[in-house]
Image (cartoon, rainbow, N blue to C red):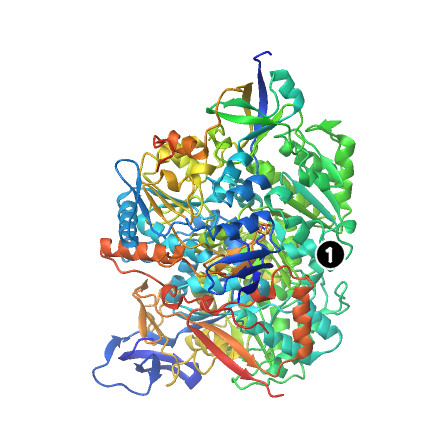
Amino acid sequence: MPKLIKGVGCPYCGSSCDDIEVLVSDDETKILEVHNACIIGTNLFHHANDPTRPRLPRRRQPDGSMKEIPYDEAIDYMAKTMLAAKKPLVYGFGSTNCEGMSAVARIAEKSGAVLDNCATICHGPSFLAIFDNGYPSCTLGEAKNRADVVVFWGCNPMHAHPRHTSRYSIFPRGYFTQKGQMQRTVLCVDPRETDTAKLADHHLMLDQGHDYELFDAFRTVLRGFEIPDVVAGIPKETIKKSVEIMKNAKFCMIFFGMGCTHTDGRNHNIDAAISLTRDLNTHTKASIMAMRGHYNIAGPGQVWAWQFGFPYCIDLSKGTHAHMNPGETSSVDLAMRDEVDCFVNVGADAGAHFPIQPVQHLKKHPFITVDPNFNMASEISDLHIPVRIAGVDEPGVVYRMDNVPIQFRAVIKGLPGVPSDEELFNKVYERMCELTKTEPIWLAAKEDRRYPESEAVI
Amino acid sequence: MASGEMIVKGGFIIDPTRKIDGDVGDVAIKDGKIVDKVSSSAKVIDAKGKIVMAGAVDVHSHVAGPKVNAGRLMRPEDKFISGVFRSGMAQKNGYRMESGFSIPSVFKTGYDYARMGYTFVMEAAMPPLLAPHTHEEIHDTPIIDEAALPVFANNWFVMEYLRKGEVENTASYIAWLLKATKGYGVKLVNPGGTAAWAWGLNCLSLNDPVPYFEITPAEIIKGLIEANEYLGLPHSVHLHQNNLGNPGNYPDTIAALKIAEGFKARNKFGREQVMHSTHLQFHSYGGEGWKDFCSKAKEVMDYVNKQKNITIDLGCVTLDETTTMTADGPFEHHLHSLNHLKWTNVDVEMETAAGIVPYIYDKNVTPNAVQWATGLELALFAKDMNRTFITTDHPNAGPFTRYPRVIKWLMSKKAREATIATMKNSDKMIGLTNIHTMDRELTLFEIAQMTRSGPAKCLGLGNVYGGLAPGMNADVGIFDLNYKNLPSDAEKIETAFQRAACFIKGGEVIVRDGEVVSHGHKKTVWVKVKMPENPQVTRDVSQAFTQGTYTVDIRNYPVREYLAPHQSVIDVNVEA
Amino acid sequence: MNMAKIHLNMITQRSIEEGAAMEQGKTNPNYFIACTVCEMNPEDMKKAGIWKNTNVKVTSECGTVIVKAIEPTQYCPPGLAHIRQGVWANQVVPPRTQSTGTPQYSGFPVTIESAPSERIKTALELVQGAVGLWQGGKI
Ligand code: SF4
Ligand SMILES: [Zn+2]
Ligand SMILES: [Zn+2]
């Protein structure tokens, strides 16, 4: 009898929906049906069934081909390569659970690596703005239960976070928003008329790359000063009307995305957005949230902040203390300046998602990929180590875009012999300790790791 | 827990649980517990000429969880003033890297508490929805035993039940939530005010109605005391009062304390109080504004001294650059409007909120100097040191690593005067406080009460922590102070408490000569209430999930077993 | 037909087609179909003599890529062009980060010209080719 598993988390986008229902085969090895997920989530679960999923590490041969090798050999190679490097770069973690992120920190520390995650190419500028300006935010339930004005600025959830608008932001009926969409006024600020903009009551089609000016104009109007007739391509009257809507909200929620972080101004755009939110709080309640891309990309920011005090771009090569300085210790900049001599790509695809030049620079040195699937990075790696898929055949904690921790479950049994990220990194750590003749430091972690079925709730 | 025998020999023992004050003696240890005696083959630890105390217990500190981490994340600059980098020795031995000053990393938190001889730390505010996060951090914090208090006073279920006067339902809900979050007790932060903050409002007085819920802070406090005693939990309600930090707030403070009148502690854990009022320093101010902002420590302590069923902790300002963080969301917004530094806020659906703002306590700014004096005065006016605990509300009034400095100020008038002498507006400060006229100097015995026996008893943990009687945990701190001949230079007191000469936890040597030498065996402590199922509460809770007021699935809400390592579960049985 | 080039402002952003296909695998044909398109306003196409659904060559300060010009699936004003996030876009994305760590994924100048007879390379060919590993698809 196939089993229907409810309350499953979707390990794709930052919405981290945990209301998915998955029908699995009797022997818990196959996913038969996926309910409630969007097309992306559905594809993700089904893809886990792919019979060609790698089951063994592969090492590149002198002729350029890849050859399967045992895990022990891969672990030994990874430990030795990282230890031999002066400054390895460990990057990724778009699809890893927090247990894996915690475990990788141990080997990064041991080998004096730079530890970075996908935020470095997505919401890194948002971190920079938070460092300068703080982050007045809330959980998504607050937006759902209270927000009567919702602003999407430089983000397009209809494409990047398909169920965001139905679970949290536009359509759902919350406690104080019983009428759902009817009760919400939606503003969208985007240079294109995106599918999200089409849903909005007001679309401000600004000139691309002029977000800072427009945020600034909003703040100026809110503070009661005059602005030019047109700012960033938007007429003054439209700006004034929009500010009026936000100011008169009971609860104004601002979501922003990579339209702001990927373009000119970067962190300054977010800085202005945060200041606007803060200003609004002198009139009403307002909150702001970064539309984090992956289901657990808030995770490394959390785990590494509690371990090292920094969310990303963490240089551990000094030995005495952790150092963070994006621009200097960020993956793409390090690569472009040839400052790292080993690259470990974990649960991400730098091959596809970095601009191609940094990939070429990184490829001058040993290049290792840890990922459940084949991807561009794995196909140019010297070593590819497959692991289980967090949220599919490996449970673990993930942090949703609002930093709410959600304890994901495994729905199927892992491929025999394939370790989780955490298990793999712990083995690499043990090997590193052997090689350096040091005692491993586990704290409480290792001894107590078990994954019992979650107990009955009430 | 280390097996085998050990004996701490020849130190000056200070153990208020047995009324021992400086007698020279031995502490025998076997299998992680303190015992009457050990065989001659026991490992000897020489404590001659030094004082020996139980492992210390911190009753209130923000060390793990979402707002602590939001503080770490938003403040890279906090790492640059940490001063201490990992030594070559620590590096060689593979100790985890340490960072941060006011909001240290989990590794530094565990190491620094151990270096000061602390064995147990209570994380003071856990948002239930985010409990897995708190436990993940506790999991990664070495050495110290930890527990966490979930926040209840702005929780929709609690306000709804109490509005209808349903104490039993409130109690059942508490029992459920403690189990789901692996929590320890009932924390109240700005009752009602934080719920109001979800709409950008606040409840400053005890009788301000909470918007929508039609209940007042006073009713929430009273109802939660009743529910807490109905359950007979090890700890009492743990109250962060309304109107924190504002000039002239002390009458509100006393009014809130008065709610405890007439209640009697009902529990099997040796606890006597029904209310723990935390970081009282922030609630003991007079004046109408910042100009005449003054200490009302005396007035507040006059009341506390009379009421045996109340305990307090100080929340001493240490005059550092620090990071304020509290579930008192509206307060942090207000603070940000005063100092205009960066502001982080996290409103949590149905439950609570949190705010974070960096703050620089400047000894040359008169209100800050007054705050400094107020915290110390609370202790100096206190009559029962077993009900008065040393905290800095870490990191709100200062980092926990400043406890030794607070001890120094409390033990030495000279040290207090030396600090006053460096203040630009010392005359003004003296006029607004009592500190300059107070000659009292606390004794080591009193310090041990305030950091060991007192907080352990207040938490209902007095049978295992806070003393050196046989049967208790073998958590022993040895400090380089000669009881018979205390140094005239008070700085030496601070140094001695900063780095224990030796710290033993669970019978294992953790710190030697101020350096961590072992990662020990930390425990996560929580309270499990067994009581008959309450169908209405079960239905109400599951509806909040199925009807989508919460945005997570109920199956993913309770903290899973593996996240809490080495659980030490305290069972509480409630008869039908 | 004139062989004019047009200068446009390029952005590269997420799309559901890309996301859905990526989760089937980056060597899946759907990923190729989803990510090898450049959306541009018909006016701009006309100016540059580009027929919709024909191949174009996109050149930025740091590289070129062949993709297919299509009419926008989400309205794009004149002057703006969009290649969906992915391997093809990243052949032309400038790695400059304004000292923030984050490359210029959006808002960089490109020239686009008609290239009907050029072939669109596969993802593997582009990435392996860039690092000297391309052996015609045999791994
Ligand atoms: S919206 Fe995101 S998390 Fe939800 S089902 Fe779709 S991909 Fe998964
Ligand atoms: Zn507090
Ligand atoms: Zn506190």
Instruction: Determine which quarter of the picture holds residue A173.
Output: bottom right
Badge count: 1
Q: Is A277 placed left or right of B9 in the picture?
A: right
Q: Tell me where residue A22 appears, x and y as whole percent.
A: 56, 59
* Looking at the image, residue B234 lies above or below residue C96: below
Q: Nearer the viewer, residue B102 or B224?
A: B224
Q: Residue A421, position in %: x, y?
A: 40, 54
Q: Position of residue C117 (x, y in %)?
A: 50, 19
Q: Which residue is mark 1?
A: A173
Does the numbered disc 1 mark a residue whose Cβ is under 8 Å from ligand 1? no
In the drawing, does residue B224 fall left or right of residue A74? Answer: right
Task: Report which quarter residue B511 is drawn in.
Answer: bottom left
Query: Where the C terminus of chain B falls, by quadrant?
Result: bottom right
Report helix, strand or loop for mark 1: loop
What residue is shown at x 61% (from left), y 80% (from top)? B274
Looking at numbered disc 1 in the image, what kind of residue is underneath it? Arg
